[in-house]
Image: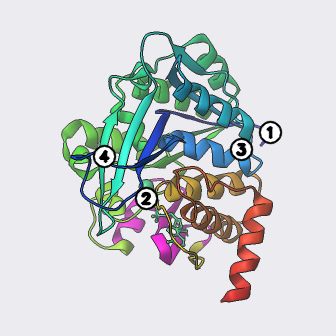
Amino acid sequence: EALGPTITVGEILVEIMATSIGNGFLTPQPLIGPFASGAPAIFISQVARCGGAAGIVAAVGDDDFGRLNVERLAGDGVDVSAIAVIPDKPTGSAFVRYRADGARDFVFNIAHSAAGETAMTDKAQALIARAGHVHVMGSAFAIPGVGRILIDAIGSVKARGGSVSFDPNLRKELVRGAEGRRLVDDMLAVCDLLLPSGEELFVASGQETEEAAVAALLEGGVGEVVLKRGAAGSTHFSHAHGRIDAAGLVVEEIDPTGAGDCFGAAYLTCRRLGMTPAQALAYGNAAGARNVTRQGPMEGVGSLAELDQLMSASAATA
Ligand code: ATP
Ligand code: MG
């Protein structure tokens, strides 16, 4: 990691969860939270817990929801110097309830929260100037100021020989608009590592089979495509290493939110630490699996030692 920390840009939120399964929030009901959350925050927490240097450009309010998040990330070892505190906006929030079929209902407060005010600052510029890798979280493009910051960060990091990863994490309705499509294409043109799940592979590539999609992306210059397959695990594709499949760990899924973010962070960090794709896949799978065993979007983030432990425990029961 001679090139400097992995950084990301985007929403920091608290998540407040319904404790019962059902449809939405139309009646009073028990809730649990606040939990630290936001896809970029989950990701960067897992980078730091894996032993990678890590920082985030974001914005929170001057309230306990903001402090909870900043203290959590700082405790994980994340550089929080570029998290702005917006005095007159509340920290972002998401209320979430799972339905019986696993779908989720949300009430979001992001666009009009402090997170919606994320903008370039002197502190952000200073962090970007030190960074060696930029991770782009598709969900962050919902904030108007974030695209600009990411473009600056990518330019700066690439000019120093650094690298870029991209988790599309976008609703396909969004990508199908012309602007969303252009965003995805711009990111594909610069990304060294693409981390899609499910439909995202097809949406990103415009192809209809896994094989055609991967071939098109690698041909287009993406260095590695790593496909997340939920409980089934993950697959790495690259010209250098070919195809590598890694089965998922067998765990009890309590709360799937955040698995993809933890997976991507562990995979990327292990690669940046010099591990092979196969080793990085194993840690990515373990990070995703560990996170789904805990209630709360980033309560299951684990260190490499904790991920090792989960892998040996799971191998022993298999
Ligand atoms: P997210 O909902 O966070 O966007 P995602 O769709 O991006 O998730 P998933 O494929 O759901 O990503 O999960 C990422 C990784 O986490 C998987 O590749 C797998 O390694 C691990 N994982 C997820 N769910 C489970 C599970 N139920 N059991 C074991 N491992 C899991
Ligand atoms: Mg995802």
Q: What amino acid is labelled 1 in the image?
A: Ala
Viewer-nearest of discs 1 and 3:
3
**In the image, residue 168 lies at what x, y percent?**
40, 49
- The residue located at (52%, 29%) in the rendering is 65
Whichever of callouts 4 and 3 sits on the residue coming sooner in the sequence is 3
**Mark 3 Cα shell of 10 Å, populated few (<14), some (14-19), many (≥20):** many
Pick the quarter of the image with the C terminus: bottom right
User: Quadrant of the rendered structure where residue 182 is?
Assistant: top left
Labelled disc at residue 106: 4
Whichever of callouts 1 and 4 sits on the residue coming sooner in the sequence is 1
Q: CA distance from mark 4 to mark 3?
A: 28 Å
Labelled disc at residue 186: none
Viewer-nearest of discs 1 and 4:
4
Whichever of callouts 1 and 3 sits on the residue coming sooner in the sequence is 1
For residue 30, above or below residue 3: below
The verdict on residue 84 being magenta is: no
Residue stretch in magenta: 212-241
Label 4 close to label 3 by CB (< 8 Å): no
Pick the quarter of the image with the N terminus: top right
**In the image, residue 93 lies at what x, y percent?**
41, 34
Q: What amino acid is labelled 4 in the image?
A: Phe
Q: Which residue is mark 2?
A: 196
**In the image, residue 262 lies at what x, y percent?**
58, 55
Q: CA distance from mark 2 to mark 3?
A: 22 Å
Q: Which residue is mark 3?
A: 48
In what element is the residue under mark 1? loop
Q: Is mark 2 within 8 Å of ligand 1?
A: yes
- The residue located at (43%, 58%) in the rendering is 196
Q: Which residue is mark 1?
A: 2
Q: Nearer the viewer, residue 174 or 192?
A: 174
